[in-house]
Image (cartoon, coloured by chain):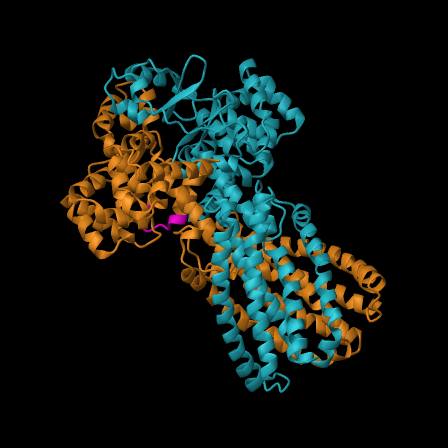
Chain colours: A cyan, B orange
Amino acid sequence: METTSTVTLQDTIETLLKSKKYATLRDILTTMNPVDIAAIFEELQDEKMPLLYRLLPKDIAADTFVEMDDETQKFLIHSLSDTELKEVLDDMFLDDVVDMIEEMPANVVKRILRQSSPEERKQINMLLKFPEDSAGSIMTTELVILRPSMTAEEAIKRIRRTGVDKETIYTCYVADNLSKLIGIITIKDLLLADDDTKVSELMDTNVISVMTLTDQEEVASIIKKYDFLAVPVVDKENRLVGIITVDDAVDVMQEEATEDIQKMAAITPNTDTPYLKIGIFETWKSRIPWLLLLMISATFTGMIISSFEDALASSVVLTAFIPMLMDTGGNSGSQSSVTIIRALSLHEIQFKDLVKVIWKEVRVALMCGVALSLAAFAKVMLIDRLLLGNPDVTVFVALVVCLTLAITVVVAKIIGCCLPMFAYKLGFDPAVMASPFITTIVDAVSLVVYFLIATSILHL
Amino acid sequence: METTSTVTLQDTIETLLKSKKYATLRDILTTMNPVDIAAIFEELQDEKMPLLYRLLPKDIAADTFVEMDDETQKFLIHSLSDTELKEVLDDMFLDDVVDMIEEMPANVVKRILRQSSPEERKQINMLLKFPEDSAGSIMTTELVILRPSMTAEEAIKRIRRTGVDKETIYTCYVADNLSKLIGIITIKDLLLADDDTKVSELMDTNVISVMTLTDQEEVASIIKKYDFLAVPVVDKENRLVGIITVDDAVDVMQEEATEDIQKMAAITPNTDTPYLKIGIFETWKSRIPWLLLLMISATFTGMIISSFEDALASSVVLTAFIPMLMDTGGNSGSQSSVTIIRALSLHEIQFKDLVKVIWKEVRVALMCGVALSLAAFAKVMLIDRLLLGNPDVTVFVALVVCLTLAITVVVAKIIGCCLPMFAYKLGFDPAVMASPFITTIVDAVSLVVYFLIATSILHL
């Protein structure tokens, strides 16, 4: 619904731009949320962008700029004067400036830094040094710091005086005179307390914080776990250096889920750019390495089939069941692997649960194996033999297929749960160990089992 | 790290419980976050739970109770006195009470309702009536409502007087005397304004709200898109009936991502319970229907192979390439389908983008197809023919394999992007159309293409 209305609005705005109805345009833009205005800019033809941008009221302009994608920002910066650029930068939070700088070419970065104050430049350079995906790289240094000796009234006064530039005023941080983080306090606590109660009495001293080098995924999971609006970031000496707010954590969570999904489907992750904005060469590059690798690794399954060529030649009917056995094995394995990978991502399980996990998967696998075998036996005898009237499908062939199926399902589920667990333990990404790799391994196993059982039962 | 320390603490707490060191236990629990205390309870042996619970300071007790899983809550409720239960309920937010009630047996629900005031009972019954997954079912009715005629000072006073029971005081809602939502205002705006500025001057009248029946996924995506801390919920007459806060939206987002991942792996979604807490029968039940369905649908691939039995019998070497062709087709298809499903989930694309999507996928598919065919040709000639010395692998066989591969990849990617788009358009869940189904369809297509090309090139 949201997006459909944006589309019509897009047309209206483009028409008004063409007919130079600037007053009307300004009226429309003033009623809109900056996020939606940014979407209009992203769809707009480039040459009209600066014109429309200058129609925006100053306070909305900066908020809108922050919400635009890199390409739109880059284009707009080129056409802004130094004064206009400075106005935008003054209204942006430092973490947003840093995010933007990371995606800009060197000349734009230089222009941005030239418009910043020496203090801001120092902060920006500090934030830029943190490794990608670390807490330091997504934190903001604009936060409200209180002293333990302040009263609630003094604290509220301080917030009213300094709060306008801070990313959140709802959680405030209490630090001693060495900048060490000693407590947190919400503005709700301050407002609901008596005016002369000391901050030290009101603050919560059981502070949960993260380090500058903590992985951003860990940060997001802490914010989610404790329902935080923000989490403080400290350095090795427990000095408060920044905060990460829930909106950034939400973005991280979404990115990480997308990344896991892409890896499970054998795609090199790209979570920064929406699908339609990624070039086809980029898309190709993220997909082809895995397809090649998995194709080459299928050489083994080919070799297995070749080595049982004689058995196949003497009982061609066996070939007809290969796809079903491989697919069922692959599906069983990826059910387990995907479940385990997600549980690891959500910290529901850890490596120490390995035995519990295997024991659970084995029992589920046995139940699945039995059910599938019985169904397969009925299917083979009823559909393949009776309905399709294939005389080569004997009870013994059905037995071979069912036995193989049961064994394959159990093996597939064990491999499916173990591989991600071991990858996790060894520090590799469990998601990369997902379905495609497991499919290749399970294919090989199921074929070997199939031919071994076939040669012994059917005496090939 | 977080979880490792909890484990050691768990042992300590159980030992202290055994040796009846209650004062020490109380000291330890007081330093902990309710979320972590709840985790301790969930791991604890049942009979000690009420004892430990009574050691908790009153304010922590209720917060801890909210964080526990259904089983632990159910057990604890049975051993709490009516007075104790009332204390817990008084401290809980209504949306949490409703969440809990939904998972409880009838006798527990009755006990809970008996401890609530008539007004609370009315609200609870109203909330229980909303369909699962709707905004109404996850909203809370405890919010701060201001009048447009109030001054900033009066508004802050009102918040200080009534805020203690509200789920968030950071965003306040302005309603007229018919309860219609006319604006929103943050406490930041109120605190940073002059005391006698009117709420009507400060409030933002461009309110983005959701309806009681809006899907919870849509709600979460709005909160994420606009970086909201809360979103107001209105009825058909635009009367303010509740709010949904960002912490609930975060949970919804995580659940929906897990649900998508499970469906992509052909598992009936279960996002309420962590992996290790789901019984094996439950797990089996969520997996077996899909395995059965997909196994039965593999009958088609079997039929295709059977109908080309003569071709296979006269050139057994063709069988060896079947797994490679099927797997590469399956992988290519699921790369596309998973990408499209995720892009649909994140509202990056819509059905109207179908042509753009297909055009993009076709070009990527052609590039992948060409690259894979060339690599496959080299692989077949070098590895299968030269290295493994299989004389049956002729240049013509290699040609058949490569041509099939190229066509399969293109077809797989087109099916992979179209199926989820059409499912979305028709109102089905795109994720259910994911890899497993596409694998089955692509398998069938690749086999038919393979045998048709083989019979014509190799004159079988």
Q: Quadrant of residue A49?
A: top right
x and y percentages locating residue A366 in the rendered image: 50, 66
Q: Which of these two is toward me, A100 or B306? A: B306
Q: Is residue B106 magenta?
A: no
Q: Is residue B212 magenta?
A: yes
Q: Which of these two is toward me, B243 or B165? A: B165
Q: Can residue A184 be spotted in the picture?
A: yes
x and y percentages locating residue A291 in the rendered image: 68, 55
* Quarter of the image where the C terminus of chain B is located: bottom right
x and y percentages locating residue A300 in the rendered image: 72, 61
Q: Residue at x 71, y 57 (%)?
A: A297
Q: Against A13, is A212 above or below?
A: above
Q: Against B223, is B330 above or below?
A: below
Q: Against B243, is B157 above or below?
A: above
Q: Which of these two is toward me, B195 or A157? A: A157
Q: Residue at x 33, y 13 (%)?
A: A149
Q: Can residue B299 be spotted in the picture?
A: no
Q: Against B19, is A430 above or below?
A: below
Q: Is residue B10 left or right of residue A353?
A: left
Bounds of the magenta segment: B211-217
x and y percentages locating residue B448 in the rendered image: 67, 72
Q: Residue at x 53, y 68 (%)?
A: B294
Q: Is residue A46 left or right of residue A7?
A: right
